[in-house]
Image (cartoon, rainbow, N blue to C red):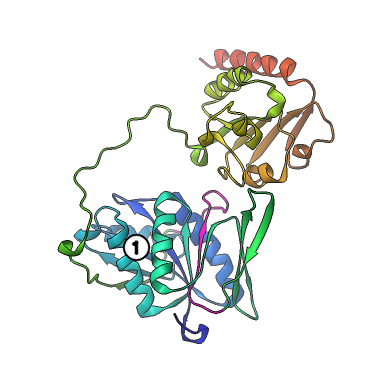
């Protein structure tokens, strides 16, 4: 839609919020945008849409945004593709940034594709790595392809803005700095409620008891094909419950039907960054490592001393997991009993 010379020297981050609560992926993207901006001496700007969201600006500036483009309107109270796409498109068309980044969340994926279509520009979805070529100012957008078997780097050479959605938990959050100031730019949306094809009748929070939120888990106990059968995942569930964590799984486990897809960690599953990642019977295929290698502490058990998982493990145990797991569960149980 625009020649690269017509763009502002700005990297935009869509600040995703729901009922005035900002999604963690926005803080991760602000941190990454700051790193990318340093390579091309660009400014970092947040884009915030919603109703009653002006109070969020202080936290956004504290997270490193130089500017904040904001539309605060009742029509944007709840997320609807038509209203949010219209608002973001109008701002982007007016100011034309060089890059727009969004989280690869349910909302981000939906919104990014709609806005990219309106702007007639390219969009790379589910990126796990971003880099900028300083000379060409091209954003190198890397994402898994062919079922996670290869990593593809994609460039958008002829259109602007360059757009990408990024998987949550791939990058570290921007560190907050109290008292930071930035430029607030208030905009309006031309769309009226009568023009919107969808209506929000009611808002019902999820009441599911088995919601799996691996991305936000501080502890993940994950199993691979080495567990040999579905019933052996009961040991992992027991350990995860004792540690206050979630159960994860490798791709082969999901494909064999031992665990449902929401538990999958890896390029074609979820990218996680827990404080503790416990890997039992996972060999460490590239597809899996890409989804968990940035965990703070990784403990791996595998009978193969040459397993690739040991290359990223903080602590590696070569041995029979069927002998070791019961002992670990027993030790954790005894330790917890002493703390009561």
Is 123 situated left or right of 250 in this image?
left
**Residue at the left extreme of this rendering:** 194
Looking at the image, residue 147 lies above or below residue 154: above
Residue 174 is inside the magenta segment: yes
Circle 1 sits on which residue? 48
- Is 296 in the magenta? no
Closer to us: 49 or 191 = 191
Q: Is residue 301 above or below residue 67?
A: above
Q: Is residue 27 left or right of residue 277?
A: left
Can residue 265 be spotted in the picture?
A: yes
Tell me if residue 337 comes above or below residue 307 in the rendering. Answer: above
In-image side of 340 versus 328 (left or right): left
Q: Position of residue 206 (x, y in %)?
A: 33, 35
Q: Secondary structure at mark 1?
A: strand
Q: Is residue 145 left or right of residue 33?
A: right
Q: Position of residue 94 (x, y in %)?
A: 35, 79
User: What segment carries the magenta color?
Assistant: 158-177
Give the quarter of the figure containing the N terminus.
bottom left
Residue 222, by quadrant, is top right
**Residue at 66%, 60% in the rendered image:** 152
Please name the predominant secondary structure of the magenta segment in the image: loop
Seen from the viewer's position, the closer of residues 113 and 294 is: 113
In the rendered image, residue 60, in percent from the top left (x then y), is placed at: 40, 60
Picture coordinates of residue 300 (x, y %)?
A: 72, 31
Q: Residue at x 55, y 71 (%)?
A: 37
Q: Which residue is more in the foreground, 301 or 332? A: 301
């Amino acid at each position: 839609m625009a020649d690269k010379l017509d763009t502002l020297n700005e990297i935009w981050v869509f600040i995703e919020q729901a009922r005035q609560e900002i999604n963690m992926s926005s803080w991760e993207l602000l941190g990454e945008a700051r790193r990318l901006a340093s390579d091309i001496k660009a400014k970092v700007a947040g884009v915030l849409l919603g109703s009653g969201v002006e109070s969020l600006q202080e936290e956004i500036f504290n997270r490193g945004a130089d500017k904040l483009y904001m539309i605060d309107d009742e029509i944007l109270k709840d997320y609807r593709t038509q209203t949010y796409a219209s608002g973001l498109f109008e701002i982007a068309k007016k100011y034309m940034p060089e890059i727009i980044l969004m989280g690869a969340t349910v909302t981000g994926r939906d919104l990014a594709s709609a806005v990219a279509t309106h702007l007639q520009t390219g969009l790379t979805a589910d990126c796990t790595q971003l880099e900028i070529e300083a000379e060409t100012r091209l954003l190198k957008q890397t994402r898994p392809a062919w079922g996670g078997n290869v990593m593809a780097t994609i460039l958008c050479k002829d259109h602007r803005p360059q757009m990408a959605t990024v998987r949550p938990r791939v990058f570290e959050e921007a560190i907050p700095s109290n008292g930071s100031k930035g430029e607030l730019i208030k905009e309006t949306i031309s769309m009226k409620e009568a023009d919107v094809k969808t209506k929000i009748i009611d808002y019902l929070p999820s009441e599911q008891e088995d919601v799996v939120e691996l991305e936000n888990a501080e502890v993940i106990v994950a199993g691979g094909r080495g567990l040999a059968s579905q019933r052996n995942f009961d040991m992992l569930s027991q350990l995860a419950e004792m540690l206050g964590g979630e159960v994860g799984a490798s791709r082969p486990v999901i494909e064999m039907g031992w665990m449902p897809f929401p538990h999958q960690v890896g390029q074609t599953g979820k990218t996680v960054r827990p404080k503790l990642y416990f890997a039992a019977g996972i060999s460490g295929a590239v597809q899996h490592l890409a989804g968990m290698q940035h965990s703070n502490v990784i403990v791996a058990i595998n009978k193969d001393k040459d397993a690739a998982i040991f290359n990223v493990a903080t602590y590696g145990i070569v041995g029979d997991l069927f002998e070791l797991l019961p002992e670990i569960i027993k030790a954790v149980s005894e330790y917890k009993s002493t703390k009561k």
